[in-house]
Image (cartoon, helix red, strand yellow):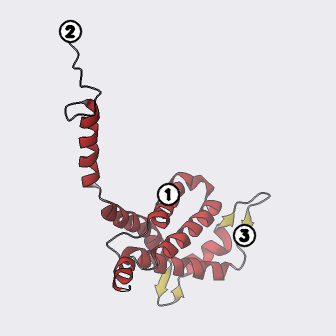
Amino acid sequence: MTVHKDIGNAGPSGLRGLFERANRLIAGVAPPSLTQLVLRIGLAVPFWRSGINKWDGFLQLNDVAVLLFNSEFKLHLPGGPYPFPAPGIFAFAAASAEIVLPLLLVVGLATRFAALGLLLMTLIVQLTVPEGWPLHVTWAAMALGIMAWGPGRFSLDNLLTRSNP
């Protein structure tokens, strides 16, 4: 039995060369700008869907949104759960943020700020629905990725920073 002596070498026929070519191929399928765009859209969708269901019209919350913050939603903190303070204000703020922040993310405007806002909302959602942590940690990871690497090339932030010296 003969063992090919180049199998572990960095040469084009070695195992290392094979892994390097595979990594380049995979990186070509997921370029950073496309990845950043998909992260932004992926994080925006669940918040947008939640927010759109809380409104009856322009600046008019529906009764269910207010009822949830008044009676159903509780903050699961030590010694709790506790009701939300000022539930009407919290309902309005949450519903507004669930519309505005996803829109900012999708177009890539004030992107890191929008991602930070959704990360903070995710933390509050986690305190409200602790059993939802597998989904919440995914939202947090997406928000942190956007905050760390920015909006990418396909964004208004990029367009605005390129045109300003």
Q: Position of residue 115 (x, y in %)?
A: 50, 70
User: Which residue is nearer to you in this view: 132 or 119?
Assistant: 119
Q: Which residue is mark 3?
A: 83
Q: What is the secondary structure assignment of the residue under circle 2?
A: loop
Looking at this view, name the residue that lies furthest to the top.
Answer: 1
Give the x, y percent position of residue 20: 28, 41
Residue 156 sits in which quadrant? bottom left
Label 1 and label 3: CA atoms lie apart by 28 Å
Q: Residues within 10 Å of mark 2 (few under 14, many from 20)?
A: few
Label 1 crowding class (10 Å Cα cut-off): few <14, some 14-19, many 20+? some
Label 1 with label 2: CB-CB less than 8 Å: no
> How far apart are the two marked residues, 1 and 2, measured between alpha carbons?
49 Å
User: Quadrant of the rendered structure where residue 85 is?
Assistant: bottom right
Q: Position of residue 43 (x, y in %)?
A: 44, 65
Question: Vertically, is 41 above or below 136?
Answer: below
**Residue at the disc numbered 1:** 141
Residue type of the residue flagged with mark 3: Pro
Nearer-the-camera pick, 144 or 59: 144
Mark seen at residue 1: 2
Q: Quadrant of the N terminus?
A: top left
Q: Find residue 122 and report its image quarter.
A: bottom right
Query: Which part of the image, by quadrant, shows the C terminus?
Result: bottom left
Left or right placement of residue 126 versus residue 41 in this view: right
Identify the residue at image location x=67%, y=75%.
70
Label at residue 130: none
* Kind of residue indicated by mark 1: Ala
Label 1 element class: helix
Q: Earlier in the sequence, mark 3 or mark 2?
A: 2
